[in-house]
Image (cartoon, rainbow, N blue to C red):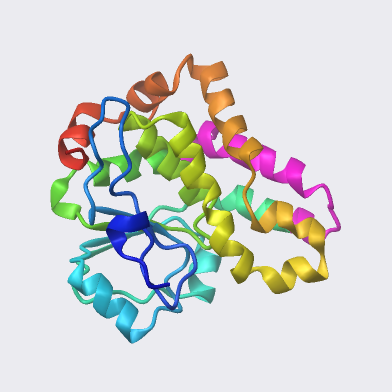
Amino acid sequence: METTLLENRILPIKGGYNFRDLGTLQSKNGKIIKSNLLFRTDELSNLETEDLDLLTKLNIQTIIDFRTDVERSQSIDKIPSTCKKEIHLDILAANMNAFLEEIQNGQTNFKSLLINFYKDLVLSEQAIKEYSSFFKILEDPNNCGIIYHCTAGKDRTGVATALILSALDVEWRDILSDYLMSNEFLVKKYQSYIEKNPALKDVFLVQEDYLKTAFEVIKENYESVQNYLTNVLNVDIDKLKQIYLN
């Protein structure tokens, strides 16, 4: 995909499907997220040599992996030479395993499974602990540039991105647009599965309802997203803005 980073934030990665920069997104007061500091993606196990060369040129310092131990053992990240820290923050291992078991046991209401999974992503004690650790990493400018990812780069990574953009005062419509952009890329990654069972679109692609549900339950339980970020995840929002906004 021969597009420049500044045109639409999508990196020309050949061995990945959902690799993009948060840079150039705009906050409500007109400030711009700096480029080349925060990258969201799917798994890194299929990166090609020229992909790693590009990430080296971007001076990637830190890779944060949200996957379970099983996922990591089955798909081992390839790391650019500049990377100094590989950090594993296991977001919802038990829930992910239970989720997969339900599918294997014949559960077909995939959308309901995903809705519940998204609620757990923002309410469960373990996810809160790991996302809080995630933001602490982001609050150290020495860790930039940062790649954070899961397997598809859409659910655990999608919620992480939505929380980052909320902390940086990005409009909801832009947060949602970035979230839904995953579908443009992942439909290629999971096309063979979806062709065999079209209902699996609810698993392999994202829907507006998933992210909306997560943010609605945040507001129901913690009054506001800002309160959740500040008092539950212990995010230093002012520090994030100093680091990532122009």
Relative to 212, is 142 on the left or the right? left
- Height in image: 136 above or below 6? above
If the image is split into quadrants, where does the C terminus sit? top left
Image point 33% across, 42% down: which residue? 25
If the image is split into quadrants, where does the N terminus sit? bottom left
- Residue 11 at x, y percent in the picture: 36, 66
Q: Give, as a single range, the part of the protein colored magenta.
A: 101-128
- Residue 151 at x, y percent in the picture: 52, 63
> Hey, which quadrant is residue 76 in on the image?
bottom left
Residue 34 magenta-drawn?
no
- Height in image: 132 above or below 53? above
Residue 116 magenta-drawn?
yes
Q: Residue furthest bottom?
A: 49
Relative to 110, is 175 on the left or the right? left
Image point 57% across, 17% down: which residue? 220
- Residue 213 at x, y percent in the picture: 62, 31
Q: Main secondary structure of the magenta part?
A: helix
